[in-house]
Amino acid sequence: MKKQLATLAILAGLTLVSCNKTTKEAETTVTETAKDTTNLLVGSWVRPNPINDKEVEGFTMKSDGSAESINMATLLYKKWWQEDGKLILIMESVGNGTSSIDTMRYDIVKNTATELELKMGDYTDKYTRQ
């Protein structure tokens, strides 16, 4: 009987250790995936200008979290970060003697080395790496 209890105790201990290891591996994978996705976001992203199809517009996201506009004089991108599968962009809208700061939260639909697709509600934007 003592042998059976000892065997059960050892098996229970091994099961707990095994489960703990799997959890740590899963946490590491999630963290590494988030870092990989963030690294894919860094760079310049453009789309056709809706007013002039011979031009592009967009933004540059830098590794330090700052952002800049590309060919957009009245919409100035300031900062960015990724959080829970979303891209958060801080931008300043300027014009007509006034300005306002906006925080936009986009769902990241697609993020590859060459394509970025963002969605907010029913609105979807598709960008390519410049």
Image (tube, grey):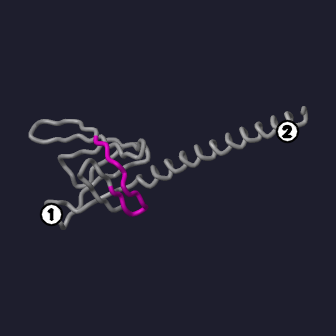
Query: For this view, does 70 lie left or right of residue 7?
Result: left
Q: Rounded to the nearest whole Å, what is the CA distance between mark 1 and mark 2?
A: 75 Å
Judge the density around disc 1: few (<14), some (14-19), many (≥20) Cα neighbours within 10 Å.
Answer: few
Q: Secondary structure at mark 2?
A: helix
Magenta stretch holds residue 122: no
* Contact check, label 1 and label 2, Cβ < 8 Å: no
The boundaries of the magenta stretch are 104-117
Query: For this view, does 33 lie left or right of residue 75?
Result: right
Q: Pinpoint residue 74: horizontal percent, then vertical percent.
A: 17, 46
Q: Residue at x 81, y 34 (%)?
A: 9
Q: Quadrant of residue 110?
A: bottom left
Q: Which mark is residue 7?
A: 2
Judge the density around disc 2: few (<14), some (14-19), many (≥20) Cα neighbours within 10 Å.
Answer: few
Front residue of this view, candidates 109 and 129: 109
Question: Which residue was labeled with disc 1?
Answer: 52
Q: Pinpoint residue 32: horizontal percent, then vertical percent.
A: 55, 49
Tag 2 or tag 1, which sits nearer the N-term? 2
Which secondary structure is most common in the magenta stretch?
Answer: strand
Front residue of this view, candidates 36 and 42: 36
Q: Residue at x 23, y 36 (%)?
A: 101
